Amino acid sequence: MAHLRIPRPWELPERLATPESVFLDRRQALAALGLGAAALALPQLACSGGAKAPTGADAKGLLDPAIGSFDAGLFRAARRNPAYGVGDRPLTPENVAAAYNNFYEWTTDKPEVWRLAHGYPAAPWKLEIAGLVEKPATLDLDQILKVAPLEERLYRHRCVERWAMQVLWVGYPLRRLIERARPLSSARFVRFVSIDDPARMPGQKESSWLSWPYYEALRMDEAMNDLAFAVVGSYGHALPMQHGAPLRIAAPWKYGYKSPKSIVRIELVAEQPGTFWNYTQPNEYGLVSNVNPDKPHPRWSQAYEQDIGTGERRRTLLYNGYAAQVAGMYDGQEV
Ligand SMILES: Nc1nc2c(c(=O)[nH]1)N[C@H]1C(S)=C(S)[C@@H](COP(=O)(O)O)O[C@H]1N2
Ligand SMILES: [Mo]
């Protein structure tokens, strides 16, 4: 290993530098740079209908909660919050959502993530809440799950790579977790740090030049918006590891990378923090990264997306369909 020079992020081969390029092969990425029909063409997913879900013996362990049977009753008791719907879009089957994941700590190969992640123990867990707060704390799993009553929400999810789904998350408003620590008025951003475990996470070891651990951030007003959800479960049970157990964020009006998984630290800060992808790809979207059909990625249009469940190609919605909840936060600002 000693003879290997660690490349700087800007030297990365394109294939490794972005999650997007895993989805789009080079020819498609070049086509997306062009005009007209080619720019609108979406790459095919694993099969003609959508992403392929493993079945039978091949799916063994696919949906296993990474915290085992710990507090299973808590998840079953979670009630659907009727304020959140996805219009006429169908719910993505849970075995599709759980078998097509972005979680680079494991691998960049989406259908393989769950197999590698399965068996990783998300219990016990420690979550630190620190920075500009009156009451810094370290929460164990039981405390993480009981910050507020669990509720279920049907959310859209839109990846910057243009795949999309409708998923049932279980959790509580992120605001409740932040309020628990009593933020100081000087706190302007919330920074999240994901787990760092290169000994057991093959993607962290293989992609050692990436700036692990994964880190993300929201503005304070975004984090306090009711739509920002602290997710601990999916489809009526605790999260399987591939979805980011035991705690991940869902900020569904933003591209998927703004929803960090397997969080170990939340920090309230005054200055705008950097993020994993802004550091790696500084020429792509900035901190806000709201879903916007009219703001193309440097290498492709965002006008259309593809549903991983049905394979349907459809128009991208501004704020991913959540304008009523979030547009007010961006009055007079660039979306
Ligand atoms: N720690 C961590 N969080 C992450 C990622 C990641 O690679 N590592 N990928 C992000 C991206 S690009 C997307 S689209 C979503 C995917 O969430 P899902 O696999 O649960 O659908 O997770 C986000 N959170
Ligand atoms: Mo993504």
Image (spheres, helix red, strand yellow):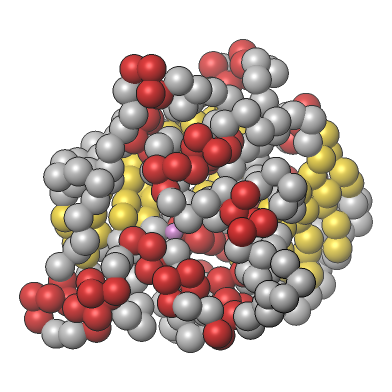
Which of the 4 image quarters holds residue 146? top right
> Percent x, y for residue 227?
51, 51
Q: Residue at x 23, y 72 (%)?
A: 28
Which of the 4 image quarters holds residue 30? bottom left
Relative height, residue 217 to residue 165 (above, below): below
Q: Is residue 226 visible?
A: no
Q: Is residue 147 visible?
A: yes
Q: Residue at x 56, y 71 (%)?
A: 277
Q: Residue at x 34, y 17 (%)?
A: 56
Q: Nearer the viewer, residue 260 or 203?
A: 203
Which residue, as the protein is rendered here, is positioned at the far left? 37
Indicate the quadrant containing the N terminus: top left, top right, bottom left or bottom right. Answer: bottom right
> Percent x, y for residue 214?
65, 60
Q: Nearer the viewer, residue 74 or 112?
A: 112
Q: Nearer the viewer, residue 22 or 213?
A: 22
> Percent x, y for residue 13?
47, 78
Would residue 260 be found to the left or right of residue 290 on screen? Answer: right
Q: How many marks?
A: 0
Indicate the quadrant containing the C terminus: top left, top right, bottom left or bottom right. Answer: bottom left
Would residue 179 be found to the left or right of residue 240 on screen? Answer: right
Relative height, residue 157 to residue 52 (above, below): below
> Percent x, y for residue 36?
9, 81
Ligand 2 in which quarter: bottom left
Which residue, as the protein is rendered here, is positioned at the far front? 3
Relative height, residue 133 to residue 48 (above, below): below
